[in-house]
Image (cartoon, rainbow, N blue to C red):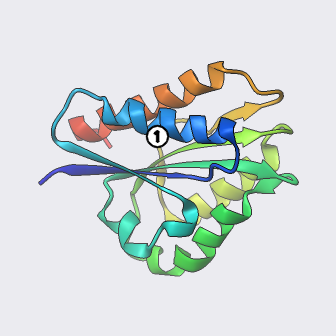
Amino acid sequence: MKKQLLIIAHAPSDNTAALARASFDAANDYDTHDLNVRLLSPFDVQTEDVIKADGVIIGTTENIGYMAGATKDMFDRCYNDWIDISAGKAVGLYIRAGLDGTATTHALNSILNGLRWRMMAPPLVLHGTWNSAFIDEVAELSLGMAAGIDAGIF
């Protein structure tokens, strides 16, 4: 059975859409046929999508010092379903932050700790003015997640 990496990306702008696409492409191009990569908007995520995934990457914007409403909506809808059956889920996180990302990181860490998901790397906070290097950073995070899932490390 193929392993699965689920990328949940809120992408309300061209720049955040480029981040989501870079995340998907990097993981999907990983040299294996044993990994299925899916990309969903937080609005489209259902409980089963995360349950079936071996690992999850969450990409969100920082809005008014907090995670995007779309990301919060996903957790509001699914958190209670996930809490008892998804402990240990491998997760990576990137935040496109106009500010410093501190409050968004704190809020997401609280949620992920409550779910008992395992962060595979420190949250990737892409803050300040847009920089095309953000695309490479997100791709690197995704490639690492894909490799870790494929190798059974995560």
Q: Which residue is mark 1?
A: 120
**Residue 24: image location, x then y, percent:** 42, 39
In the picture, which quadrant includes the C terminus? top left
Along the line of sight, which residue is nearer the eye, 70 or 125?
Answer: 70
Using residue 150 as the reference point, say whether residue 119 is left or right of it.
right
* View extreme (top): residue: 133
Along the line of sight, which residue is nearer the eye, 96 or 89?
Answer: 96
Up/down of 5 relative to 126, above or below: below
Along the line of sight, which residue is nearer the eye, 68 or 91?
Answer: 68
Along the line of sight, which residue is nearer the eye, 86 or 62?
Answer: 62
Q: Quadrant of residue 42?
A: bottom right
Up/down of 146 relative to 61, above or below: above
**Residue 74: image location, x then y, percent:** 58, 69
Using residue 15 as the reference point, say whether residue 59 is left or right of it.
left
Q: Quadrant of residue 110?
A: bottom right
- Identify the secondary structure beneath mark 1: loop
Categorize mark 1 by other alpha carbons within 10 Å: few (<14), some (14-19), many (20+): many
Up/down of 26 relative to 102, above or below: above
Using residue 84 as the reference point, say whether residue 129 is left or right of it.
right
User: Identity of the amino acid at label 1?
Assistant: Met
Q: Residue at 48%, 67% (x, y): give it.
A: 45
Q: Residue at 67%, 42% (x, y): give it.
A: 95
In the picture, which quadrant includes the N terminus? bottom left
**Residue 30: image location, x then y, percent:** 29, 29
Q: Residue at 39%, 58% (x, y): give it.
A: 88
Q: Residue at 80%, 44% (x, y): give it.
A: 102
* View extreme (left): residue: 1
Number of marks in the image? 1
